Amino acid sequence: MPDRRRAWRRHLGDVIFGLESWLARAYDVALMVIIGLSVLSVMLESVPSLPGNTRTVLRFMEWVFTGLFTLDYLGRLLGARRPWHYARSFYGVVDLLSILPSYLALFFIGTQYLLVIRVLRILRLFRVFKLTRYLSEASLLGEALRASRAKITVFMVTVLSLVLVFGTLMYLIEGPQHGFTSIPTSVYWAVVTISTVGYGDISPQTPLGKLVASVAMLFGYGIIAVPTGIVTAGLVRAQERRQVVCPHCGLAGHEADARFCKRCGQALNPEPAESRELKKPPTARVEDLHSR
């Protein structure tokens, strides 16, 4: 009986966590469809113009989805080889958060709208449709951002300083009578202007204020290009670090795990003589000494 129960749990884990069988892939695809329908129902429920019977149907469907997700979470706990490890993982926490708001809504009004957290489960698409091969490119972007964090920090501090300066100037020049009621409001105008969004809800009226606004707009166009150049340079450097250059012919562009040059065929990372000697068995070293 314990062996049969262990085999049943192993089969359940293969269906829920695996991708080898058609049943496992069908389960994951069906789960993605249910997640999308659940998020759509939560979004529609927040529309105030919906009739009462439609809202009732959406709430009933939401409890159906919650029941399905609860069964899925319990099944994952039963089918996992290490249930506690799964419960503490990223997907385990997301799966738990996707069902908690429905039960919390029984005691706290409004928490059911937190069910949009379920959209995070769509991240399983990377596993279902074999998109994990693109994660290396994402790691390359993360490496470039980490290498450029000092420059980005300096850039953000500079932008913050400009926003404070322009906001304070506009508060002193325009004043509350033209909509600049406080320095924080003027700083908000400066952020909108320098970022070239330009909502237009606050605008200068005096000639001097328009001159300062023009200067802020010109600064904004120049500022847009700075972070792009920083990240692009970081990407180029990260890509160069990943490329392996042949020490014999100088050809670059090899993969990080390449062992031989694709032009001349020489070893890309030849081992030093000392490491080769250490890898030899003791008997081979003794034979080498006798041969000398």
Image (cartoon, grey):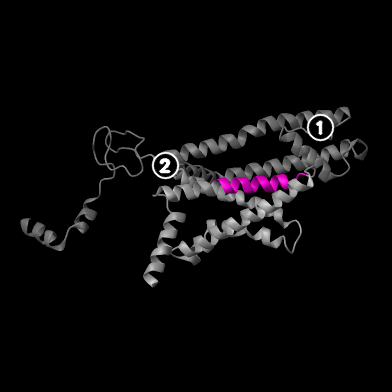
Residue located farthest toward the left when viewing the structure as drawn: 291
**Which three-letter amino acid code belongs to the residue tagged 2?**
Arg
Q: Quadrant of residue 186?
A: top right
* Image location (x, y in percent) of residue 218: 72, 29
Q: What residue is shown at x 42% (from left), y 53% (from top)? A: 18
**Label 1: how many residues lie within 10 Å, few (<14), some (14-19) or many (20+)?**
few
First in residue order: circle 2 vs circle 1: 1
Name the residue tied to disc 1.
200
**Quadrant occupied by the N terminus:** bottom left
**Quadrant occupied by the C terminus:** bottom left
Please tell me how many numbered marks the rendered image carries: 2
Residue 123 at least partly seen: no
- Vertical arrangement, residue 273 with respect to residue 246, above or below: below
Is 34 one of the magenta-colored residues? yes
Provide the residue span drawn in magenta: 33-47
**Which three-letter amino acid code belongs to the residue tagged 1?**
Gly
In this rendering, position of residue 103 left or right of residue 260: right
